[in-house]
Amino acid sequence: MILTVTLNPSVDISYTIPNLQLDITNRTDQVGKTAGGKGINVTRVIHELNKAVTATGFIGGHLGEGIVSELNKNGIKSDFLSIEGETRNCIAILHDGQQTEVLESGPTITDNENAAFLAHFKQSVDYADVITISGSLPKGLDEDYYVKLIQIATDLDKKTVLDTSKSSLSSVLESPFKPTVIKPNIEELSDLLGEKVSADAANLKVVLADELFSGIEWIVVSLGGNGAFAKHGDRYYKVSIPNINVVNPVGSGDATVAGIASALEDNLDDIPLLKQAMTTGMLNTMERITGHIDINHFDDLFNGVVVTEY
């Protein structure tokens, strides 16, 4: 079983307004509402890969109940910790070929809820083979909270996939407790190292050998339409992907995490793991709904991914 962690989930609301105007009333009948948050996207894709998955994190209020209800309706198991605060909304306004977002910060986690989730997580991890940890931290939690989760998982000899950025990621990299996999993009690598990182394979090979990444078994660097560059132990790989019809690229990184996690659970070798990760990411970009894949196209795309040791 794969356990997905989303500490700051949301109800994602999209409004399509072709000609958005400011300071007047705008109306639309094109509204989408779905359970959201990076880890929730990961959860849906793992489920669509026909793998056993359980979603956990903090959940609160009527909005939180709606998220759990949606997951249940889709046959996805959840094991969230209920909190006093209300789960947030995240609003996207689609207009004039652009997307304007309004993101609520979400609830503030109390000290008691903080401690309760660590105990809750330890129990949940005991039944999991792989754990994914995605997204930002809600207010009230220290920057090193993910370090605590990874320590619990490591102590129980569980594999972890971490997809976060900024101080949440740097705190983990500077700690003695390392995830199995991280999945930064070029911008996140540049932020971590405080210097401009290019997508050139030779440059990435030097960057990923930096001491900052010591102890990380897998580093998969997303390069968008140019595929990925990866490091596993002392081996490096350049991953090329076929041209596809991109409908909605949002959530493709989460779908990639889902592919990695399911590959880890199946103990796949390096090349099939990377091909699966890229395939699930591409499948997400071909769908209108974020965090969704059509498994019927899996084999064709999988066979089009080329992995070369660099």
Image: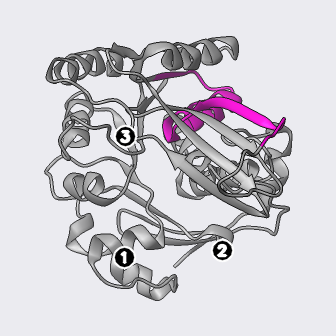
* Residue at screen point 64% across, 17% down: 70
Residue that sits furthest to the front in the current view: 24
The reply to whether discs 3 and 2 touch (Cβ–Cβ < 8 Å) is no
From the viewer's side, name the closer residue of 209 and 46: 46
Q: Which residue is mark 2?
A: 226
Element carrying mark 1: helix
Separation of marks 3 and 2 at Cα, in angstroms: 26 Å
| Residue 90 showing in the rendered view | yes
* Residue type for callout 1: Ser
Q: Was residue 308 drawn as part of the magenta stretch in this picture?
A: no
Percent of width and height locating residue 209:
30, 75
**Label 1 Cα crowd, 10 Å radius (few <14 / some 14-19 / many 20+):** some
Q: Tell me the number on the disc at residue 160.
A: 3
* Residue type for callout 3: Thr
**Label 3 Cα crowd, 10 Å radius (few <14 / some 14-19 / many 20+):** many
Element carrying mark 3: strand
Element carrying mark 2: helix
The span picked out in magenta is: 27-55
| Picture quadrant where residue 195 is located | bottom left
* Residue type for callout 2: Asn
Q: Tell me the number on the disc at residue 190.
A: 1
